[in-house]
Amino acid sequence: MRDLRALTTWLIFEARAAMGFAREREIWIALACALLLWMLAYQAPYTHRLDLGGNLQTGRRYDDEPFLGDSFNKSEPADPIPAGTTLLLRWSKQDSTLILPGIGGGRWVVRVSASSGPRPAPVVSRWDDGTTTSSLTIDAVQRDYHLAARANSSGDLTLHFVTPPLEAPGDPRSLGLVMTRVIVEPIAGPRLPAPRQLALLAAALALIYLLLRRFAFAPRPALALALALAVLAALLLARERMALTLLTPRLPVILAGCYAIGLALAALERAVIHNELASEKAETGRQGDKETAEQPRRTTHYRLRNELEGRRPRPLTPSPPHLIIALILLAAALRLGGMLHPHARFS
């Protein structure tokens, strides 16, 4: 019962501390400035190129997978790539969907490099963005086809391809079109930011501020670092939008986990110091009955000056090594972010 009461007291204390940090003026300044920066970043003209099947120049083959799910067939040719290969590709299925999350609201021009494959005649394929549908006649020559598309209310661009399947003897796959590249370019005009991405980034920034305040910095340094991270996120939204928006759904979860880990480490550290103090106090009490002239044995927690000058040693004030905890949490967040990013490649 005593342990349960202590745990409840600790949880209430930490909840009140977090609420106190959340009421600070600095966190709201950081969020307001960050939202303004991110909305401005969405006004930057952003073009995204997606190489379906991979890119021979960079050697990366699977960066398209997070946008396709399982609605496309595997990249061809299969690894290892045969010598002399000049083109990597994917076959779409009879019903395939490509999603670019958080690209931003408004209208976009989509250029899709596609062909009908080894069909005796051109095939009519229906392409839509969730609101309008276009029928395009695709022939056997690989060429670019244009589509005017609009992002949905969340700021995601969804492209849907429905094609009569190719009947290929001996091939059980659903074969639609041969696709090699998708390029998305903005149409001139003001751009609407993706509200879901702004909410996820704001949640992540708020958690970062709470982590900084709990384990590392005073309000003003925490504000400065939060603003620096907001600027970095704005630059990524302007230059590498898809690389960031693929990770944003995972960021609040990673940071909330880091906060929980940090609280556990801080509690463990306090328990260790408390046990050391208790054992030291008991040992000092046993030695006090032997020789009054003899100074009690000091530990590294007491200042050496007190021992040398014969002053009365001051009781130990626990000073948790929060900087060490902050560094541990930073390493954990970076590692988890790298492992959970869909474009990560690791052993």
Image (spheres, rainbow, N blue to C red):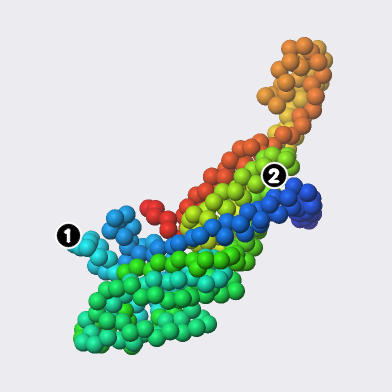
The picture quadrant where one finds residue 154 is bottom right
Image location (x, y in percent) of residue 280:
73, 29
The residue shown at (58%, 40%) is 327
Q: Considering only vertical position in the picture, is 97 above or below 321?
A: below
Q: Earlier in the sequence, mark 2 or mark 1?
A: 1
Image location (x, y in percent) of residue 108:
49, 70
Q: Which residue is mark 1?
A: 83
Q: Is residue 178 left or right of residue 84?
A: right
The residue shown at (74%, 12%) is 308
Residue 286 visible from this viewpoint: no
The picture quadrant where one finds residue 105 is bottom right
Image location (x, y in percent) of residue 45:
51, 60
Q: Which residue is mark 2?
A: 223
The residue shown at (75%, 47%) is 26
Q: Amino acid at mark 1?
A: Ala
Question: As rendered, which of 225 and 5 lies closer to the eye?
Answer: 225
